[in-house]
Amino acid sequence: MSPTSLGPGGVRPAAVVNEAIRALARAAWGRPFTDEERVVYELLVVEWAAAERAEVVEAA
């Protein structure tokens, strides 16, 4: 599966979302997130959790 393809149910793979979270954290480079970055982070965490659940269901 390519990093841009969607997993089960149209969810990006957890590894792809995890990399987006890491990139956001690297961009902040030790400073607190701005309000906008915090919103993006929270959305990414929710997306990551959904991707993890989808991968577990697919593996079962």
Image: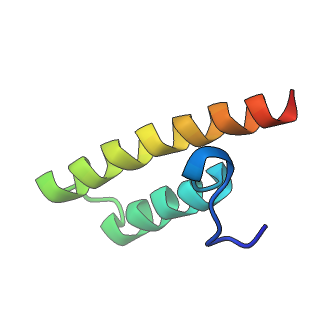
Q: Is residue 33 above or below residue 46?
A: below
State whether residue 32 appears in this view.
no
Which residue is pictured at 29% across the width and 54% down the height? 40
- Residue 44 location in percent, x, y? 41, 49
> In the figure, residue 6 lies in which quadrant?
bottom right
Across and down, in percent, residue 18 comes to 57, 54
* Count of labels in the image: 0
Which one is in front, 11 or 45?
Answer: 11
**Residue drawn 53% across and 43% down?**
48
Can residue 48 be spotted in the picture?
Answer: yes
Rendered position, 9 above or below 33? above
Give coordinates of residue 31: x percent, y percent: 26, 59
33 and 20: which is toward the camera: 20
Query: What's the residue at 61%, 61% (across, down)?
Result: 16
Quarter of the picture containing the C terminus is top right
Using the rendered view, name the quadrant where residue 13 is placed: bottom right
Q: In which quadrant will I find the N terminus? A: bottom right
Q: Which residue is rendered at x = 47% and y = 56% of the image?
A: 21
| Residue at the left extreme of this rendering | 35
Lateral position of residue 31 relative to residue 12, left or right: left
| Outermost front residue | 9
Q: Residue furthest right?
A: 60
